[in-house]
Image: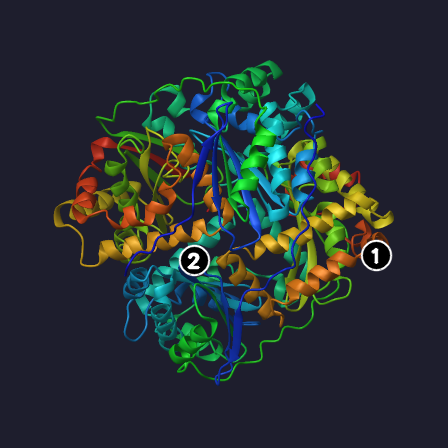
Amino acid sequence: MTKHSLPDLVPDSKIKLPRQAERTLASGLTVIALRRAAVPLVELRLRVPFGRAPLPRATLLSQALFTGTGSMSSIDIAAELQAVGGGLSAGLDPDRLLITGNALAGGLDRMLEILAGVLTDATYPVEEVATERERLVDHIQVAQSQPAHLARTALLKRMYGRHPYAVQTPEPDQVKGVRPAQLRTLHADRVRPDGAVLVLVGDLSPDKAIDAADKALGSWTGPGKDGDIPPVPRLEPGPLLLVDRPGAVQSSLRLALPAVPRTHPDHAALQLANLVFGGYFSSRWVENIREDKGYTYGPHTAIEHFIAGSALVAAAEVATEVTGPSLLETMYELGRIASLPPGEEELEQARRYALGTLRLGMSTQAGLAGLASMYASFGLRLDYLTEHSAALSSVTREEVAEVAARYLAPARAVTVVLGDADRVENQLAALTTVERNRE
Amino acid sequence: MKIPATKYPVERFTLDNGLRVVLTPDRSAPVVGVTVVYDVGIRSEPEGRTGFAHLFEHLMFQGSANLEKLAHFRHVQGAGGSFNGSTHLDYTDYFEVLPAGGLERALFLEADRMRGPRLTEENLRNQVDVVKAEIRVNVLNRPYGGFPWLKLPPVMFETFPNAHDGYGSFEDLESATVADAQEFFERYYASGNAVLAVAGDFDVTTTTRLVEKHFGDVPARPAPSRPDFAEPDLTEEKRSTYTDQLAPLPAVASGWRVPDPIGDFTGYLPYVVLAEVLTDGDASRLVERLVQRDRIVTSIGGYIGFMGDEYQVRNPTALLLQAHMPPGGDAEKVLRIVDEEVDRLATGGLKPGELARTQARMATHHLRDTDAVLGRALPMAVLEEQRGHPGLLNELPKLISEVTEAQIVAAAATLQPIRRATVEVVPGARQ
C-alpha cells in the first residue's frame, strides 16, 4: 500500500511555563503556586526535609500523621476534608516527608487550615497510633512476600552498604516497638517549615494562593534540623548476589550503575544513553529480551535521583528457565552501548521521546505539582524544564558514547538476582562469579 | 459545597465505513490523546481460548500493512509519546498520548492496524511468551495475584463468558493459532465495531479531514451481533476458599449483582455512590468500623466492576468489597460486621453531611481523571461505543451529586447475604 505513509511530525512549539509565584515565608517555608485552570481543582504537595530521621519512627509517623489533633479526631479530619472534595496523605522517602493532597478549587483555604492543624497540633492518640502500627506491620509483612520488594531491598543493601540509603523499609519488629510519645518528639523535632517547600497547583491565582498559605500556615514555625545525608559511596561491582526464593517461577534481575544528578553536565547525555539502552519500550534491551526473545513482560531502567546521589537501576522479571540467557543479553546490550556510539536515528528517536515526555509530564495539574515539588526539593524550579530541553536538544552521538562508556559499562554494574537459587545458580555461574545469600 | 462540572466540547460523526468518531478539543496543554476502542472483550472469547482477547491485543502491536514489527512503538515514542492497550470484559482499547504535533501520526498508526495486523506464527509465539511472562508477574509469582478480579467471577457466575479466567490458561494460550487470530480480527475488529476518540490540543475542522484521510478507506465491515451475557441473580449465598502459597495474610472479597449499568443507569448510579459511602476514606462507614474501631481488617475497598471501570462495563456486573486482614483474621466476622453496617445504613439512613461529602470527593476524583487527555479520550470512546453518549463524561459530577439518600438506602437494602458471592484467601506462606 502506497496510499498511506507515515505523516511528518509538526514541530513542537516552545515550552510554555504556567503562570506562577513564589515566596519564602517568615517561618522558612517556601511556597510555590502555579496556575493551571483546566479543571476546578487544586493539588497540594508539601516536602519536609526528613533525612536521617530514625526509619521505624519516621515511617510510622507518615502513616499516623492524620490520626488526630487537639481539636479533631482522625474521622473529623477525613470528613472535613471530604466536605471540600479533599484528601491528604503522607509518605516517606529517604530524604523527605511528602504530604500529598487535592480538593475542589473552592476548598483550598479549608484544606490548608486542616493541614495547618495537623502540622502544628498532631497529637498521635494512643489508640489510633496502635491501629496504624498494626496496619503498618501487616503492610510490611505483605511487602516482604513480594518479589519486587525483596529484590529492591537486596539491591539497596548491596549498593549502599553502611550508608543511610541502604535500608528504606523498617523491619516489622522495629515498628512494633515505636511508642506515640516518640512520634510526638519526632514531629516536634522534624516536622518544621524551615527548608520545607509547599507547592499549590490548579484553578487558582498564584499570589492569592500564597497569601492563603501564609495566613493558614503562619503559626507553623520552628527551626529545621540538619538532616544532611553524606554523599553516597561509589558502587562497588563484585560478584553477582543471588538471593534464594525457593519455588519462584520468575527471577527478579536487578542491576545498578552509576549516574549523576540533574544539574551535572553529563546528565542529558546519560539520560539519552539510558533511553537507548533500556529506558523506554523502543530501547535495545526491551526490543531484545521482550519483543525478540519473549523472556520478560516489562523490563525497565530508570535514573533514580536522591539528594545525596543518583543511580541508574535496571529491572526485569524473567522466567526461571531463561535467567542466565536474560543476564547474557543484558550484559551484551550494556557492553554494546558502552563500546559503540548509538545510531543517528536511534539517538533522534530517544531525544524526541525525552523532550515529549517533559511536555506530557506538565500537561495535568497533578503532573505539574509532582514535577514542581520534586524539582524544588533538589533546589530547582520549573524553568529547569526549559534548560534541560535545550541540553537534550544539543547532545551529540559522541557525547552519548562517551558517557555510556563511563557510566553504563557492564564492568561497573552491581547485580542482584532473586529467584529459585537451585535452578538458576548454574545458569548465572556460567556468565559471572555468583555469591549466594540465603535470606 | 457546590459540585462543579466540566464543559468539554463533544463532536460526533460516523464515517461511511461505520467507524464512529468523537472529537473533544481542549487547548489548555499542547498534547493530544488518541484512542480506538473495539467492542470486544474477555466475555466474547470462545471456549477453549481463554485469554485470547488479551493475547490478540498484544498482536495488534506487532505490525500492519505499512508497519514492520516494532515500528508502532518506535513511531509513537519517536514522536515524544507513549502508548498502550488494555483488554476489559466488554471492550479493548488502544491509545497514544503525544505532543500535539504527533496527532496525524497517531491517526495513521491506528488506521493502519485497523485495516489488519500482521498475524504471523513468529509474532504469535513471541507474544504468547510475553503474555505468559505478564501472567507470572501479575498472578503466579506474587501474593494475591488475580484477587479478586480473576478469583471471584467463577464463584458468582455460571456461564463461561462471565466466569472464566480472562488472563487465560497457559494451555489455551499455547494452543492459539494464527487462523484463530485471523478469524477473531475479521469478526470483531470491524470498522463498524470501533470508535475513534481524540482529545486535547487540535482544530476540529483539520482533524475531521485527517480522520477522513486516514480512516476513510478502511474497508467497511459491520459490527457482529453482540450476545446478551445476562445471568439470573443469585438466590443463595455462594462461597469459595483457596490457598495462596505466596500470601502471608488472609483476605476476603464479596460481590453483589447491581442493576444494568446501561439499561438502567438511574438505578445503577446509586450503587456507585454507595460503594464510596461505604469505603472512601477514614470517615467512611466500613473503614471507620472495620479498620479503626474493630481493627479486624487492615484495609477495605469498595467499587463496581471487576476491573474497577464502573462507567465502562455492561451487564452483568457487581458491587465488590475486598478486605485484607491481620494475622489470624476471621472472614466470617468481617462479613458479619459488613452485614451489620449495611443493615444499619438500610434501616437508619445516612448521617448529616455524609452523602454530600462523599459526592464532593467523588467529583474531585472524577475531575482529576479528566484533566489528562487520555482521561477524556478513553472514557468518551467507551461511552460512545456502549451508550452513544460520550457527553455523559461532562454530566457525571452533576448526576452523582443528584443521587439521593433514599436511593442510597434502597441500594444498601439489596446487599443481602443470600445475594452475595464470596471468595476467601487462605495464607499459605510462612508468617
- State the SS at label 2: helix
> How would you rate the neighbour count of disc 1 (Cα within 10 Å): few for under 14, some for 14-19, many for 20 or more?
some
x%, y% of residue B113? 61, 27
Q: Does residue B107 appear in the picture of this structure?
A: yes
Q: Circle 2 marks a residue in which chain?
A: A
Residue B109 lies, in percent from the top left, at 63, 33
Indicate the position of residue B261 as horizontal and vertical percent values: 31, 34
Q: Residue at x 59, y 40 (%)?
A: B83
Going by the numbered disc 1, the residue's amino acid type is Glu
Position of the N terminus of chain B, as image quadrant, is bottom left
Position of residue A417 relative to residue A186, above or below, is: above
Up the image or down, B142 lies above or below A225; here it is above
Q: Is residue A408 left or right of residue A102?
A: right
Mark 1 or 2: in front is 1
**Residue B112 position in % (x across, y down):** 63, 28
The mark found on residue B268 in the picture is none
In which quarter of the view is residue B425 placed? Answer: top left
Q: Identify the mark nearer the N-term, 1 or 2.
A: 2
Image quadrant where residue B210 sits = top right
Which of the numbered marks, if any, corresponds to residue A136? 2
How many marks can you see? Answer: 2
Residue receiving disc 1: A399
Question: Contact (CB < 8 A) between labels 1 and 2?
Answer: no
